[in-house]
Amino acid sequence: LICYSQNNFSMSFDGNSSIEISDINSSLDEISNAVTFEADVYVTQIPNGAHARIIHRSEGVGGVPNRYGLSITPLLEGNGTVELWIENIGVAYSDYALNLYQWYHVSAVYNGSEIKIYIDGILAGTGSASGDIEVDGGIGNWPFWIGSANGSSYFTGNIDNVKVWNQALSDEDVLNYFICPPTEDEDGLIAFWNFEEGPGNVVLDVTENENNGTINGTIYSSEIPQNQQCSQGCTDSTA
């Protein structure tokens, strides 16, 4: 692990905004029976009705069979817990809800036999799951979304440091990356949006895969997670 402290911005989502990553021969298609999603989130409103998406991808709109989402649960259906659901494979929820106006590091891991939810590097919920993820761009080139699900189920608050891995991180890895974010060239890291200011209305994927996104109403914010102020202290053998 290599630590770095450069983090000046997050992205602010007003409940009607999103980031869209178009699918053009994307590394985001390279997910099968193992995946990890990570993000720093700062929720300012519990959703009412819809499940507010941190990330989302689906081959179509609505209840299509090939889709997944990392979400904040709505009022009366979890009241602000974190969930990862993969259609026809499984779902897991955090054991407790997130507080409003507080930063959390959320990780969700699918390893082929279960889904695990971690909050601030600590296991917070599990669920049985099995099967291969079959979501990719397909004929329709369906995009990957941050803060929305195809223009609905909007997130309200701030999101930072969104990462996608095509492998299931271990408990130790999840904790280490909560303490010290990965560099852009880590093995298995297929997308990483750190939301440091990009050109125009574009957010940059800092990995070599260039899954750059288009801003749809979101704005850069100086509200940033304090756990990202990492300058030293990584403990694994490669540090």
Image (tube, rainbow, N blue to C red):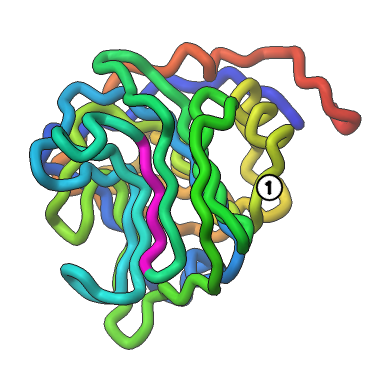
Q: Left or right of 233: which side holds 218?
A: left
Q: Left or right of 196: which side holds 223?
A: left
Measuring 41% from the left and 54% from the top, which residue is drawn there?
91
Measuring 9% from the left and 44% from the top, which residue is drawn there?
49
Residue 14 picture quarter: top left
Is residue 66 inside the magenta stretch? no
> Which class describes the residues within 10 Å of circle 1: few (<14), some (14-19), or many (20+)?
few
x and y percentages locating residue 72 in the rendered image: 28, 38
- SS at mark 1 in the image: loop
Q: Left or right of 236: which side holds 207?
A: left
x and y percentages locating residue 8 in the rendered image: 42, 20
What residue range appears in magenta? 82-87
Residue 47 picture quarter: top left
Quadrant showing the C terminus: top right
Q: Is residue 11 above or below residue 22?
A: above
Query: In this view of the protein, can residue 4 be seen by the observer?
Result: yes
Q: Is residue 189 above or below residue 231?
A: below
x and y percentages locating residue 32 in the rendered image: 57, 70
Q: Which is more toward the observer, 91 or 194? A: 91
Query: Residue at label 1?
Result: 185
Q: Left or right of 46: which side holds 128?
A: right
Circle 1: residue type? Asp
Image mark count: 1
Q: Which is more toward the observer, 7 or 118? A: 118
Residue projecting furthest to the bottom? 139
Measuring 54% from the left and 44% from the top, which residue is drawn there?
116
Residue projecting furthest to the right? 237
Q: Which is more toward the observer, 89 or 8? A: 89
Measuring 31% from the left and 23% from the top, which residue is drawn there?
42
